[in-house]
Image (cartoon, rainbow, N blue to C red):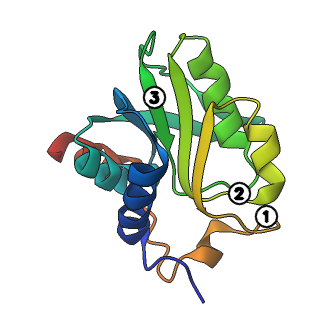
Amino acid sequence: MKSFENLRDAGEKLAALVKTEYSQTPDVILAVIPNGVPVALRVGRDLGVPVRGLPVFRTADGPVVFEVPPVAGLRVIVIDDGVETGAVARVVATQLIKGGPASLTLAVPVCPRQSLAELALHYDQIIAIDKPLVHRSLAWHYLDFDTIGETSAQQLLADQ
């Protein structure tokens, strides 16, 4: 059985879990563009926190973050559509930590148990709904893995 109908449903479920497990009020939510945006917007709306886009480019050598927003002293939650291998989450954390956030939390609908321990070295807290034993394609967890493009993600962010 699939855990989520689509990205928006994942956002609704993640928002409820973040409200329960995150004890502070974050200063900002950073949505990994593109598919993290629909998930993050629901969390941001429910918490009353602004959502900003975090462009991550996938290259042959791995993910690269080119535009790192200022995060010094801020409580930051990073949201994506899920974790498969953890490569994107690691690169994002590495770049954001250089900016000196007060705290850095990863909140995702899916994070394999294989990735949790390693990602915990980079994040102060990891919030995940599904924690499967092994890595699988994220599409496996969604009834309709309704991925969006970068332009659509930017438009959703502009419309918030």
Q: On residue 30, which mark appears?
A: none
- Residue furthest out toward the left: 159
Secondary structure at numbered mark 1:
loop
Looking at the image, do the residues carrying marks 2 and 3 touch, with CB atoms under 8 Å apart? no
Figure quadrant of residue 95: top right
- Residue hosting label 1: 135
Pointer 2 local density, CA inside 10 Å: few below 14, some 14–19, many at least 20: some
Q: Determine whether the residue tagged by mark 3 lies in a helix, strand or loop.
A: strand
* Mark 1 and mark 2 residues within 8 Å of each other at the beta carbon: yes
Crowd rating for badge 1 (residues with CA inside 10 Å; few <14, some 14–19, many 20+): some
Question: Please, what is the three-letter code of the amino acid marked with disc 2?
Answer: Glu
User: Residue at the spot x=75%, y=48% of the render?
Assistant: 116
Three-letter code, disc 1 = His
Name which residue type carries label 3.
Val
The residue carrying mark 2 is 84
Percent across and percent down for residue 75 are 44, 24
Give the number of the disc on residue 76: 3
Up-down: is 23 above or below 13? Answer: above
Asked if one can make out residue 151 in the rendered structure from this viewpoint, the answer is yes
